[in-house]
């Protein structure tokens, strides 16, 4: 009698902080460990570094440049060379004034970020059932004001592991947009 193959659990990338400029994403065993860093001497350039603890290598896999009054740009680097800069709007195609958008991973699969209950979810663009491939879970605080009782995390299904860098970069861009839109709404109501 053959048993059904056990489904791999999703990767739980835990955030060190609630910042989209300076934080880390990592799973418990550090198989995936990404550092998002914006240095004070380059305040408009955010680097996404991947740590490989087994090989003891740090690689800059992507960069996001957001200069004042200019469009956000992104580039993906390889171990051999830096990539070409492209506009974030060319990487993540938006639909009207929505916060989310679609992007195509290296394997040709098209993904779409959408808001669900005020938080972001990533689904395959052609999926009729809209089953989340990646989902943001917010942090929680003790009594809603004190220290964090639970850190935020991004839950990513194993089938999307090949596109993990693009998922992280697209999440950072879309989350920045979402936070700016939220701030804009607050300022308009003040």
Image (cartoon, rainbow, N blue to C red):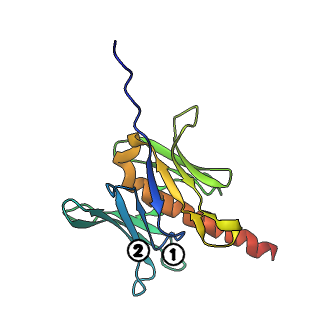
Q: Earlier in the sequence, mark 1 or mark 2?
A: 2
Secondary structure under the numbered disc 2 in the rendered image: strand
> Looking at the figure, which quarter contains the N terminus?
top left
Which residue has dot 2 on it?
37
Q: Is residue 29 above or below residue 4?
A: below
| Crowding near the residue tagged with mark 2, few <14, some 14–19, many ≥20 C-alpha atoms within 10 Å | some
Expressed as whole percent of the image width and height from the top left, the position of residue 169 reads 43, 60
Q: Quadrant of residue 131?
A: top right
Between the residue at mark 1 and the residue at mark 2, the CA separation in whole angstroms equals 20 Å
Residue 75 lies left or right of residue 82; in this view the side is right
- The residue most toward the top is 1
Residue at 40% from the left image edge and 37% from the top image edge: 8
Expressed as whole percent of the image width and height from the top left, the position of residue 136 reads 55, 54
Residue at 65% from the left image edge and 57% from the top image edge: 97
Expressed as whole percent of the image width and height from the top left, the position of residue 98 reads 64, 55
Which residue has dot 1 on it?
70
């Amino acid at each position: 009698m053959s048993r059904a193959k056990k489904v791999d659990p999703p990767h739980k990338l835990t955030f060190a902080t609630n910042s989209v400029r300076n934080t880390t994403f990592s799973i418990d065993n550090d198989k995936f460990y990404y550092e998002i860093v914006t240095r004070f001497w380059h305040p408009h350039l955010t680097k996404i570094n991947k740590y490989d603890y087994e090989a003891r290598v740090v690689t800059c896999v992507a960069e996001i440049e957001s200069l004042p009054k200019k469009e956000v740009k992104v580039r993906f680097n390889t171990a051999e060379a830096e990539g070409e800069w492209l506009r974030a709007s060319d990487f993540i195609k938006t639909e009207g004034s929505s916060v989310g958008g679609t992007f195509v991973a290296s394997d040709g699969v098209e993904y779409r970020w959408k808001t669900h209950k005020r938080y972001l979810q990533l689904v395959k663009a052609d999926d009729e059932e809209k089953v989340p491939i990646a989902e943001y879970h917010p942090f929680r605080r003790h009594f809603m004001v004190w220290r964090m009782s639970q850190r935020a995390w991004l839950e990513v299904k194993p089938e999307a592991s090949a596109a993990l860098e693009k998922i992280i970069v697209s999440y950072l861009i879309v989350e920045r947009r979402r936070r700016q839109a939220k701030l804009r709404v607050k300022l308009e109501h003040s």
